[in-house]
Amino acid sequence: EATASALLLRAGLALLAWPVYLLSFLGIWEPFCRKVFFPFFLEKISGAHDKKSKKYKQELFRNLPDFRGPSGELRLLEIGTGSGANFQFYPAGCKVTCTDINPNFQEGLSRNMKKNQHLHYEQFLVAAGEDLRQVPSGSVDAVVCTLVLCSVQSVSSTLREVLRVLRPGGAFYFLEHVAAEHSSWTYFWQQVCYPTWKLVFAGCCLTRELWKNLEEAKFSELKIQHISV
């Protein structure tokens, strides 16, 4: 629960962001955010974030080739592909199905597809992580989800879909931002920023304890590492 001082600062932040709250009330902000602001914002910060997270992603995806199917092909589904920042880490010949609830990342996506012609791009589906009905059960070897579980409507439903589309023995790769240690200043500021951040950045929740959802999901094996980027 947020403390009184966090609530006071939260109100101050909301006051500073009142134009966004007004646009949201009028029904203007969300379509503008999805179509213009959020893709633009992600494009601007992705360069800096990619540099900081590159070594972690290289390590995370290092064993992707181990999950090739019996045919020798690696069929990969990415939830929340965005502009395709992860393509560079996928092995050559990998067959990629891209999904995103927001279809407005075409510019960055096209650029990253051209840069990463070592991959086979199977299809792009406009779909939420909680509803991947267009993807047959047990049809992919690996599912990737990075910086997406913070903004899905239901984490548990999304993880159920991950388990459904994976073949037996397949793997789920994730890299997510989560709530900080509750006694830390970082968590205090996450509490302060939470409502305004969620509104401005397309439903992104700062305080989710996603490791708990992952532990509750029925994966046969789970490897979680907490890092600070």
Image: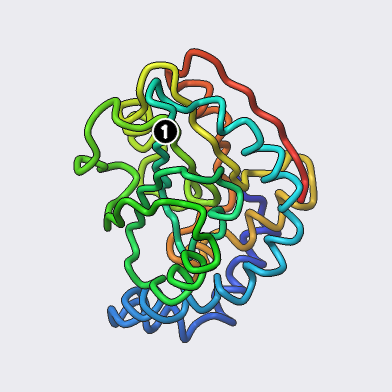
Indicate left or right for 111 with 55 as reference.
Answer: left
* Residue sitting at x 25%, y 28%: 137
Q: Observer-nearest residue: 168 or 133?
A: 168
Q: Regarding mark 1 in the picture, which secondary structure is present there?
A: loop
Q: Count of labels shown?
A: 1
Q: Which residue is mark 1?
A: 73
Is 88 placed above or below 220 here? below
User: Could you say where residue 218 lies in the image, as x and y percent from the top left?
Assistant: 42, 17
Name the quadrant of the N terminus.
top right
Q: Observer-nearest residue: 119 or 31?
A: 119
Q: Quadrant of residue 72?
A: top left
Q: Observer-nearest residue: 63 or 217?
A: 63
User: Could you say where residue 86 lies in the image, as x and y percent from the top left?
Assistant: 56, 53
* Residue sitting at x 56%, y 74%: 43
Q: Residues within 10 Å of mark 1 (few under 14, many from 20)?
A: some
Looking at the image, the residue that sits furthest to the bottom is: 19
Looking at the image, the residue that sits furthest to the top is: 220
Indicate left or right for 202 with 50 as reference.
Answer: left
* Residue sitting at x 36%, y 41%: 154
Kind of residue at badge 1: Glu
* Residue sitting at x 73%, y 44%: 56
Indicate left or right for 178 with 183 as reference.
Answer: left
User: Could you say where residue 135 lies in the image, as x and y percent from the top left?
Assistant: 24, 39
Is 156 placed above or below 99 here? above
Display colour scheme: rainbow
Q: Observer-nearest residue: 117 or 61?
A: 117
User: Could you say where residue 120 lies in the image, as x and y percent from the top left?
Assistant: 40, 51
Indicate left or right for 196 with 139 as reference.
Answer: right
